[in-house]
Structures are given as C-alpha cells and as structure tokens.
Amino acid sequence: MKINRRDFLKTTAATSLFFAGFGLPSFASQNKKNLVVIMLEGGMDGLCAVPIRGDKNFKKLRSKINLKKTLKLTSDFDLHPALENFKACWDQNAASVFHATSIPYKGRSHFEGQDMMMSGGTVPYQEKTGWLGRGMNLAGLKGNGLAMSLPMPLLIRGVPLNNNYFPIRSSLPQKRLLNIIEEEFNQYSEKDLSETLSIIRNRDLNYFPGTNASTLALEAGKLLSDPNGPRVAVFKVENFDTHAAQGGENGAHADCLKEYDQILKALKASLGSTFKDTLILTLTEFGRTIKQNGGNGTEHGYGTAVLMAGGLIKKSKVHGDWPGLKNKELFQGRDLNATMDARSIYASAMSTVFDLDFKRIQKDVFFGDKLENLSDKLFKA
Amino acid sequence: MKNFFRKVAFGIGPNEEVPSDPLAWALNQLDDVPDLTWKGRIPSGKEMIEKYARKNEIELKKVRKKYKDDKKLLKIGIERLNNETGLHFWPSLELSIRHTEAMYSNSPVLAKLWFFWSNHFAIVDGGFRTAFYTGPYEREIIRPNLNQTFEKLVYDATTSPAMISSLDNSENIGPKSKIGKKNKKSSSINENHARELLELHTVSPAAGYTQEDITQLAYIMTGWMNGYSKSTGDTLPVEFNKDRHQPGKKTIFGKTYKSGKKGLANVIKDLVNHPNCRDFIATKLCRYLITDNPTEEMKRPIIKAFKDSDGFLPEIHKAAIRVAFEYNDQYQKFQKPENWFLQMAKLADFSWPSSPTIMDLYEVGNKPQLAHTQPHGKLWSLGHNPYGSKQPNGFSDFEVDWISPELLIRRLVFAKDCFELTKSKNNNFKFYKNIVKKNFDNPERIFKYLEKANKPYEIQILLFNHPEFLRA
C-alpha cells in the first residue's frame, strides 16, 4: 500500500488525538481552515487584471484600453491599479496569481461556461452538482457551506444543509411570533425547519446592512472566523462581460475588479486572525480576446488568470507557464492560451483546506480527469 | 384530505365552495385546455420575437459602438433600448397571466400541471432573450399541448425558438454538411440540445445511452436552427437548414435513422415509447405532487396510463392526480416558494397580481412603473422566479433544495409584508376562520394556534408559516 505524505499526516493527527488526554503533543488544536470562492461572472479579463509587461504587440492590439498606470508585481507582470488591497496582500506574501489558465471550456457562451466553472465537468449542463459541493461532501463538511446569495449556486450543491446570507430590506416578525412558530415546528417534528429557524434567530436581523459586496463580505468574514461557523463561502461579482467601454484604469472592467478588491478588503478585516487560515480564490468562465473590438471592449476569450489571496498562500508569485502572445501562440488565433487546467488549482486548494488526498479529489470530485497537484507549490500545508 | 386542494392546485379561496367530490373536481379539469383567464393584452410569441427581441438584438450592437468611450452613457443607452423594447415589463406581464390562471381560473389543476411541464422543458435564463421568449413559449408551445400527446409536446418544445436558442442547437452544424465542409473551422456539432433531449426531456440517464448515442442524436438534430439574416439577427422563424444537416444514416439505441428533416420526428417517436421515458415521467410527476422518493406502486398506474393511451397527456395527468389523491393522507410535500405564495395569495384573497387595467396602461417605450414590474420583483426576491431557471433541468422538486435560512426568512417576511395586499374587509378572525375551515381537516387545532395572534396581520404570519400550510 502506498501512503502519501498527506495520508500519513492524517493518521498521525488521529493517533495524537487519541493520546491527547495523556499530555502527548497534539494537532487537535489545529485551526479551522476556510475556503472562499469569488465567482467573477461574465468573463474576467486576465490580461486587464494582470497584464504582461513590455509586449509591444499586446499594447498595439489594445491601444484604446491599455492601462497607463499600473502596480508592479514582477519583472514580467503588472497589476491593475484597482486591485490595491490585493497588492497589499501580495506585499505580505499573502497573494499570488496563476496566469494563462482556464476551466476546460472552449466555447463562447456565458451560460455554458458558468455552468462548467461551477460543476467542474467537461461538458456543459452535464453535472447537476458543483465541484465545491462534491469536495465538501467528500470531506464530510455537511452544513458548512455559506452562499452569499439567495438561490443556492450550483457551485456548492452536492452537500446537504448549506447556509446562505443575502439580507432582505425588511424585518422579521416579532420574537413572540417566531416562538409560536418554532413551537409548532417542534410539535410537528419538522426537524430541518426547526434547525433552520434557530440559525435565523441567531442572526442580528434588526438592521438591513444592504447586499453590496463588501457588506456581504464583512458578514461572511465574521461567520467564517467563528470556530463553529462555516468553512466555505461563495460570492459572486457580475458584469465582467465588457463588450463596450471596457476602459483602462477607469472603466467597466475596472469597476468589477474594484468590487472584487473590496470583497477582499472586507474579508481580510472581518476575518481578523482567521485570515491566516483562509484561501480566497477567484473563478471565471473564460478570459477575453486580446484585441479590442469596435466598441472599445473585448469579446469572449479563453485563457485568463486566477487571483489567489489569504494566509494559506505560500508566497507572492505569478505562477504558470506563459504561452506567449504571438499569433501562432494564441488559442484559435485570437485568445491567450491556457497552459493549466484551472481545476488543478481548485483541486489543490480543496486538498489543502479540507485536508483531503489530492487523488481522492481528482477521482471523486473531478471524474478522474488529468489534473496536476499544485498544493505544495501554491499553498502552505 | 383537504390539503389535496393545495396539493394538486392552489387551495380553496374564501368565496369558493369546497367541492363535495375532490377527485372528480380535479379530474374534470384535465380534458380541455381553455383560453387563458387573463383579460388584458396577451402578446403573441411572433410579435415578441420579431418585433421586440429583434430590435433589442440589432440596436444593442449600435449602442455599444456609439458609446464605446463612456461607460455611463453606455449604461443609459442600454437602459433606453430596454425600455424601447419593454424588456423590464414583459416578465411581469407573463407572471400576471400565469398567476391569474392559478388563482382565478376554473382549471387550477391544469394550471399546476402547466407549471410542471414548463419546468420540465425549462428555458435557461440567459441575457435579454428570456424576457421575450420564455413567457410566450410556455403559453403557445407548452399549454396548448396539455391535451395532446407527450410525443407532440416533445416535438413542439424541441423545435421551438426558445428551446433551440436556450440549448444552442443553432450552432449544431454537421461537419460533413455543405456548410460544414465550406467552413471547416467554425463548423462542428453542438451536443447540448441532443443530450438534454435524452437526459432531461425523455428517457433520462437510466436508459443507459452512450456518448455515441448522444453524438448520433446531435447529428440527427443538425440543421435545426433559429432563422438568421444580417438585418434580423437570429430572430427569424425556426427552420431546418439542409445545408447544415449531417448526411448519412445515424444509429441510436441500435436503430437506424435516415438523414433529413424527418429524422427528428422519427427519433422522438421512439424515445417517448422507450420504457425508461414512461418511468421517468411518472417519477417526476410523483415527485412534483407527492414525495421526493416515489415508490414503484405510485408510479405503476401512471406508467400504465402512459402506455395504454400512447402517451395521451390527459390520461397521464388523470392517473397522476388519482395517485396523488390515493396517497394524499400519507405524504405531504413541502411547497416550493411560488406555489406557497400563490396558495397564500388565493386563500387570503390578496389584490394580486396587478390588474389587466393597470398592466395595459404600460406603453412600450416608457420606463415601467412599480406596479408594472412588481410580480417579477416579488418572485425574484422570494427566490423562485419561474422564468429564471439557471439550468436546463429547471427548478428542483426536492424539498432539501428549498430549505435554507434565507428562503425561510423570505417566507416569514413575505407573510408579514404581504399584509399590504389584503383587503381591509378581510382583516378579521372570522375571515381567516372561514379559509382555515375550507382548507384544513383539523381546523380546531389551527384555530387554537391562531388565537395566539393579537392582530390580523399576525394571524397571517402564523397561518402561512404553519407546518400544515408549508406542506400540501
């Protein structure tokens, strides 16, 4: 039998737990680790968020939407100036980028692409559960998911009893009435309803904080930092589909990146010390064409970047195998190519955060598809 | 027993008689498809697609070009175009038509089944198109087929502009077709529609089809597309374009089909006669009406009715309603948000939806008033806008998918806030006692519970969050 490092660690931890009462060293007090996924809907332009430096051809193709001012990441890559909180994390070795990557979707439809980025499959609409939900199920994380939306997104379906948070501008009925209803739920043995009602009653619902991204993120951070709270949170930022007036430092795409950056800022603030045990990853359906179109926007593309942040990041670095932007290096002659299946990143993240064997994730979550274990390269064990 | 009126319909309103023979009452609604009850304007699918969707599609390109340098002006330009095509109005009009059928028609049981099939053949909520396509599709393709065969329903849904657009069959081009050979790079098959026709609409994965079966069905479906021209976009009527059709024979489940337009009708005929198709439809009907996990005994009479009648929908529906009646006291199903809302609206006699007079005041070109967009806003906020399915498998019929903190908060808050939709003459215990008597078997127990309320609006919160009301 082959034992890999991760399995070995788990066995050790379990044994230690057994002896914990006898004063032997223990991993039992290890902190709860969290995974946050921010879905960037509409197709995030990896070349706008993390542009390549010194590529004249690239500059020429984007003459109307080039960034005149950037933040510097490495000798090869810049960062969009709207991502200032991401940059702050980067400076503390708590942010990194995986560039030239994509989910295995090569079509041009948002709806198919968004379906596949959430399902983790290779065929649109084939899977009816999400990769994150299946991963949580594998890790036994029932009741540990938190969606910052009203409908439960496909991404975390596949594990029971997920929580969600998306406040409505109205107040709940008075406590007295909730007591009466709860009593009736119990009389009728409505266990799930009763449990759900008690979750609701623990929330502070006397105010309507709003449903903008950073408000939701503040709340999510609070819940994630609770040792008994959820371990997974899911956000979404819409409107990355900038077919026109994409803009440079200021513009439609910059606004979306800023919204992501604000979520990051709010999460970091409200997670507090839990930030060091957290991974925050982005997910998008595809990148955007290199060439600007007649509306000073971009069309649906292919390769893009995944933004990663949190204390579980190994070090600030732009990962990936850069495919180049010469004509013959492009996907279908127009898009940044993908040299890494983005699912490798997500599988590695789940392996790290959920303490699961990578191969099991590959097999049970991603259908045994060929993925690369990047855990040690990208994340702290 | 009385929960049967909510199980297969939307309950008994305060001014309605309780039918003395509930089963006969339900079965009598299933032979004919009457005209819609809504008295206001009902636009045709042709008008919606060829006038409004077309304008939106064509003009959007121009707006994007015109305001390419200014994101604020672009936003205003798109908003103006949306008003010029009624984009924010149509979904609420469609919901008003739909809800009127549930609450005020003489065939609420048929309405409940209409909603079932619309969800079975769900249209994916995608971009601006949904606002123009989905409502008319449910009215003109799904509804008239409720007293036809399942085979005809499948064929009509499959060749409808809404479904073809939703599942990308316009991009399904045979590589060996005339056009496929000419444009090698951009022509390939698109299997989405073919796969869902097998998986979601007819035989289900239980039939054990292979990837090759999917590919072969996709070949049969090549050429079916939304008609296209440069000046109209893809808003011309659905056509079979033989220049895109993959030539040669195709084989599915071991049976061979000749190339050509008739292939689709032929293969659908075989799919709906497949034993797994009957089993799948029976399972879904039982799951919708009775329980998450239907038993073989429940499904058997529905499967038999399907087989004996060659898939005649009124017979299938009658069998399903009989089974729902038989198991009524044994199983109570947790109701999905829209169903729950409609039952509340009907029992409490809400002023809902907006009246035809109000809806007809809207003129395309203007920004709609709140009353013109309220149905859509309310259903969206409730977490179950029936026209907003994110996936082609529609909204789940499993209870667990509808129990989450926010969704329960919506029920509590809606029961409270919808008090504004009640009529003041009804704001008294007597009114609520009347509807409880009509809709519950043990009214005394519910009265006792409701007596804990101090004010009429509190009765409403308690009643519509009572476990017996949340289920049917």
Image (cartoon, helix red, strand yellow):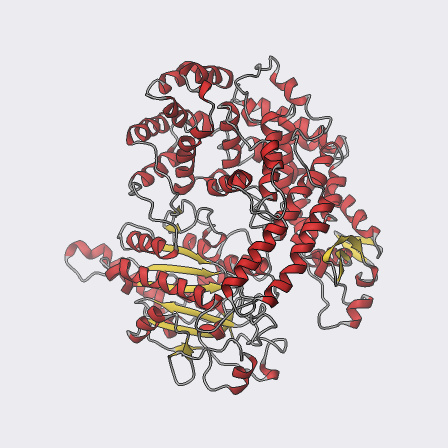
Q: Can residue A379 be seen in this view?
A: no
Q: Image quarter for residue B120?
A: top right
Q: Position of residue B70 (x, y in %)?
A: 51, 67
Q: Where is residue A191 in the image (x, y as percent from the top left)?
A: 37, 34
> Does residue A77 appear left or right of residue B250 in this picture?
left
Q: Nearer the viewer, residue B106 or B309?
A: B106
Which residue appears farthest toward the left when viewing the image? A23
Q: Which of B85 and B93 is in front in this view?
A: B85
Considering only vertical position in the picture, is B213 above or below B185? above
Residue under the image location 50 percent in, 52 percent down: A154
Q: Where is residue A119 in the image (x, y as percent from the top left)?
A: 52, 57
> Does residue A15 appear left or right of residue A151 in this picture?
left
Q: Where is residue B347 in the image (x, y as percent from the top left)?
A: 50, 23
Q: Which of A283 and B87 is in front in this view?
A: B87
Q: Which of A314 and B71 is in front in this view?
A: B71
Count of residue discs: 0
Residue under the image location 28 percent in, 59 percent down: A271
> Does residue B196 appear left or right of residue B181 in this picture?
left
Q: Image quarter for residue B167?
A: bottom right
Considering only vertical position in the picture, is A13 above or below B286? below
Considering only vertical position in the picture, is B366 above or below B41? below
> Does residue B68 appear left or right of residue B255 in this picture?
left
Q: Can residue A254 be seen in this view?
A: yes
Residue under the image location 61 percent in, 72 percent down: A294
Considering only vertical position in the picture, is A256 above or below B202? below
